[in-house]
Image (spheres, helix red, strand yellow):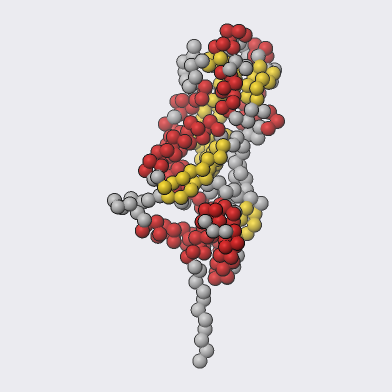
Amino acid sequence: MSVTSATPRPNPDDLLVLLAVGRTGRYTAAADELGINHTTISRRIATLEQALGGRVLTRGAGGWELTDLGREAFTAAEAVENAVRTITSEADGSRLLEGVVRMSATDGFSAYLASPAIARVQRDHPKVTVEIITATRRASIQRSSLDIEVVVGKPQVRRAEAIALGDYTLGLYAAREYLARNGNPATIADLAAHPLVYFIDSMLQVDDLDLASSFAVAMRESITSTNVFVHVEATRAAAGIGLLPCFMADLHPDLVRVLPERIAVRLTYWLVTRPETRRRAEVAAVVNAIREYVAAQQPKLIGAQHYS
């Protein structure tokens, strides 16, 4: 009598390795997350593919992407992860969240919006760690190792969800010292006599921010930087008139809004996340906290209505 060998079952540990690679898009990032080496990641994926009888990952321009079979295995891996986390619930039965959430956002958003929102998450879930990379750029079109990206302007992305968080306003500001020495512009034409503090034109990657200063083509450049905190401090130091986010500039009583009725550039923050990362409870918690905090801050983001 012949004996037919049983079909090999995928190892749950191998599924969890796929989970990490599927979320980060990179073997190295998955290895760092799991505390194992790159070679082990590769071997585990090969073993999983042998058990499943097909490829679970394919190389894309932005990293490793899940195949159709890989997406099925990824869903199974999420079930394994959720089962493990159920065992580690709090005494009151609430879900214990833990893990690393990686996000990128602009400097100002990271400091004044993301940080306080994330702090609220960590008060309830101290084992959640959030890594914030500050960058003013477009959303990644291809796969990236980020769980969340916050960008300015509506992004064009594939296999990802883009959520409008809320609007904010850029306005012209000057230090009281600067205006006392150089006069307060009364018209847009008067701006030609003043230097502008803003982004470095040749390095600006965001179309909406590039177009924001189109009214100021006659203004000569003063101090320019890729960092909005430099814009604020250079303007406070009387280096020129700065085109600044109102929610940052309005915090400083030594700054005065210039031509508020004429210059108010409305922009929108967008949040980008992929479905497979959004299903992670810790990522969903951070996303929800950011959305709620930004909504509550809308009056400040749009800009104060009193000027002196």
Residue 79 vs residue 229, the one in the foreground: 229
Location of residue 188 by image quarter: top right
Looking at the image, residue 303 lies above or below residue 87: above
Q: Is residue 64 visible?
A: yes
Residue 151: x and y, percent? 56, 37
Left or right: where does residue 137 sit relative to residue 90?
right
Residue occupying image coordinates x 67% and y 12%: 193
Residue 163 vs residue 125, the one in the foreground: 125
Residue occupying image coordinates x 62% and y 16%: 240
Looking at the image, residue 51 lies above or below residue 20: below
Count the marks: how many?
A: 0
Left or right: where does residue 256 sit relative to residue 87?
right
Residue occupying image coordinates x 44% and y 34%: 116
Residue 106: x and y, percent? 56, 34
- Residue at the bottom extreme, as displayed: 1
Residue 100: x and y, percent? 48, 48
Q: Is residue 21 visible?
A: no
Location of residue 162 by image quarter: top right
Residue 107: x and y, percent? 55, 33
Residue occupying image coordinates x 53% and y 16%: 255
